[in-house]
Image: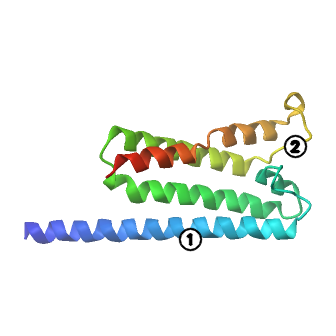
Amino acid sequence: MANLHKLDRLVGSTVMAYRFALTSIFSGALFVLLLCSLHLLQPEFDPTWRFISEYALGDFGWMMHLAFGLLALAQISVAITIFPYIRTVTGYIGLVILGISAIGVIIAGIFVTDPISVSPDDATFSGSMHSTGAMLDYTPVAALLISLDGG
């Protein structure tokens, strides 16, 4: 009976991890799809020298806000999915950084950036908050630390 209970818990946690993994895949893919759509809908924004956040300033700003939300959802879902498999301090530090990155993306998604032509001294509250959120996004560092975990 005890083994059956353990099996039920294992199957339940596997199903939950599977759902979070799918959520991460789909939300990440939708983020990329929205961003590509914005490149097509607003060709005046040249992504080679402008931040993608500036798409929020145009007619399709809602799409950029949604994209940021999807990116944060992907980050959170990845963290939840891989949490049980992390075994080292390095991996846990990577998870914490991934969580901080998700918070930063949420902040950046809530607050609209200022145009690139606005100097830091003339930044609005919203622009300053957006910049703060963007500065918290260290997803590549988190990915590196998590990959070094080897779990």
The label shown at residue 105 is: none
Q: Mark 1 points at which residue?
A: 26
- Image coordinates for residue 72, horizontal then vertical, percent: 59, 55
Q: Earlier in the sequence, mark 2 or mark 1?
A: 1
Type of amino acid at the residue the image marks with label 2: Ile
Q: Residue at x 39, y 70 (%)?
A: 18
- Image coordinates for residue 13, horizontal then vertical, percent: 31, 65
Asked which quadrant contains residue 32, the reply is bottom right
- Image coordinates for residue 108, horizontal then vertical, percent: 70, 47
Secondary structure type for disc 2:
loop
Q: Which residue is drawn at 69% across and 70% down?
A: 33
113 with respect to 33 (left or right): right
Q: Name the residue under label 2.
A: 116
Q: Quick one: label 2, few (<14), some, or many (20+) residues within 10 Å?
A: few
83 with respect to 63 (left or right): left
Q: Which residue is drawn at 82% across and 57% down?
A: 55
As displayed, is residue 33 above or below residue 115?
Answer: below
Secondary structure type for disc 1:
helix
Give whichever of 151, 22 is nearer the camera. Answer: 151
As displayed, is residue 127 above or below residue 84?
Answer: above
* Residues at discs 2 and 1 in contact (Cβ within 8 Å): no
